Image (cartoon, rainbow, N blue to C red):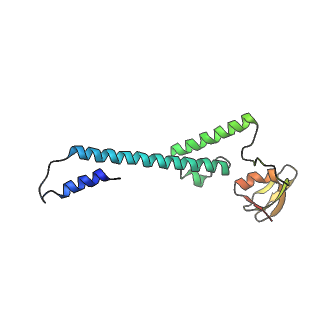
Amino acid sequence: MYGKKACELVKEFSSSEPGQLSAFNSNLFAQVIEECNFHFHQLQSLLRHNRAEVIQSLGWMIEPPLPEEIQEKLSSSEKEYSKTHSATIKSYQSEMDLDLAVDMVPPKDPYIKVRVLDDIGSVALSDQIANLARHAILFLRRTDAETYISQGLMEELTG
């Protein structure tokens, strides 16, 4: 039970006569400290693991580097972890000559209908120069649009 030793220590303290000191139970006190440290380390480990999973997940959804509004929420070790994780993925992709962010199932149509969510401006795509103005609806090659979709600058329109 969590806090069992601490509860014993508090009961021992409260059972003494008011205004009187009973013998200090250093053994029980040490056990309370040990229990607290154990739970602290468990909680810290759990939080770090959870945050690392979120950072990895963001690394797949957002093109590195992570946006500033996310970076400012990370500790210095988490920022380093994010950089290292991104660099490792990039190195592997380069070495194997593949893009892990692209779907492994080929699309039925190489062109998709997209809506631009944020003004991007004029960009050179694989087969055209396009003005990617906010709210514009376009048919683009899937490979051209995927980067912008993953960055949250476009959305694919279905149906």
List x then y, in percent, for residue 24: 18, 47
Q: Residue at x 75, y 57 (%)?
A: 120
Q: Quadrant of residue 112?
A: bottom right
Number of marks in the image? 0
Q: Residue at x 55, y 52 (%)?
A: 72
Left-right relation of 3 to 108: left
Q: Residue furthest top?
A: 95
Q: Nearer the viewer, residue 115 or 4?
A: 4
List x then y, in percent, for residue 140: 83, 56
Q: Residue at x 64, y 42 (%)?
A: 86
Left-right relation of 92 to 141: left
List x then y, in percent, for residue 43: 43, 49
Q: Residue furthest right?
A: 127
Q: Residue at x 81, y 64 (%)?
A: 137
Left-right relation of 67 to 115: left
Left-right relation of 11 to 140: left
Q: Quadrant of residue 82?
A: top right
| Image quarter in which the C terminus is found | bottom right
